[in-house]
Image (tube, helix red, strand yellow):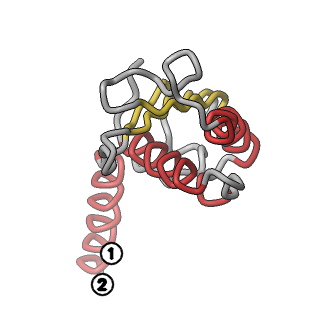
């Protein structure tokens, strides 16, 4: 009987030790599983060479800030000043970021009407950011 108790205690302690040593996991919800810091992620370039980059700030286990920018093939941010004229996509950068902070879960962020491709890139960039280690 004592051997069984010792064995159970040893297994429980071993599991607790393994759990304590495991790397932090991100579920994309901005909850306690994310360490405070700034997380950055970017998408692969699309067929036109453009890509998106998300910068997510976690404080107190919550997403407190989100910033998203898309870049053109030559690495310039998409903007009117740089010759990018699709205003709906430009408006979506801030709107999607604000919705992420509000909802705290990338899977709950709605598609931005008229900018579905941008929404997809945004989701991909955020997920990549939350898989990364924070740059404290």
The residue singled out by tag 2 in the image is 1
SS class, disc 1: helix
Tell me where residue 87 sits by quadrant: top right
Give the residue displayed 44% in from the left and 51% down from the top.
124
Give the residue displayed 63% in from the left and 52% down from the top.
105
Vertical position of residue 101 compared to residue 110: above or below: above
Q: Nearer the viewer, residue 33 or 113?
A: 113
Of tags 2 and 1, the one toward the viewer is: 1
Left or right of residue 6, residue 86 in this image:
right
Tell me where residue 129 sits by quadrant: top left
SS class, disc 2: loop
Within 10 Å of the Cα at label 2, are there few (<14), some (14-19), or many (20+) other Cα atoms? Answer: few
Residue 128 percent coordinates (x, y): 39, 45
In the rendered image, the residue lying farthest to the right is: 102
User: Marks 1 and 2: in contact by CB < 8 Å?
Assistant: yes
Vertical position of residue 132 compared to residue 75: above or below: below
Residue 102 percent coordinates (x, y): 76, 42
Quarter the N terminus occupies: bottom left
Quarter the C terminus occupies: top left
Q: Nearer the viewer, residue 25 or 64?
A: 64
Residue 98 percent coordinates (x, y): 72, 36
Q: What distance separates the C-alpha of mark 2 from that of mark 1? A: 7 Å
Q: Nearer the viewer, residue 74 or 2?
A: 74
Can residue 62 be seen here? The reply is: no
Vertical position of residue 115 compared to residue 8: above or below: above
In the rendered image, the residue lying farthest to the bottom is: 1
Residue 67 percent coordinates (x, y): 58, 28
Can residue 1 be seen here? The reply is: yes
The residue singled out by tag 1 in the image is 5
């Amino acid at each position: 009987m004592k051997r069984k108790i010792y064995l159970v205690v040893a297994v429980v302690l071993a599991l607790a030790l393994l759990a304590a040593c495991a790397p932090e996991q991100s579920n994309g919800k901005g909850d306690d599983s994310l360490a405070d810091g700034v997380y950055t992620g970017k998408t692969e370039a699309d067929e036109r060479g453009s890509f998106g980059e998300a910068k997510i700030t976690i404080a107190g286990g919550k997403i407190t800030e989100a910033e998203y920018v898309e870049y053109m093939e030559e690495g310039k941010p998409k903007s009117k000043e740089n010759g990018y004229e699709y205003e709906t996509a430009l408006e979506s950068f801030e709107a999607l970021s604000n919705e992420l902070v509000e909802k705290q879960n990338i899977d709950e962020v709605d598609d931005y009407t008229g900018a579905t491709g941008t929404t997809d890139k945004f989701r991909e960039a955020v997920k990549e950011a939350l898989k990364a280690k924070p740059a404290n």
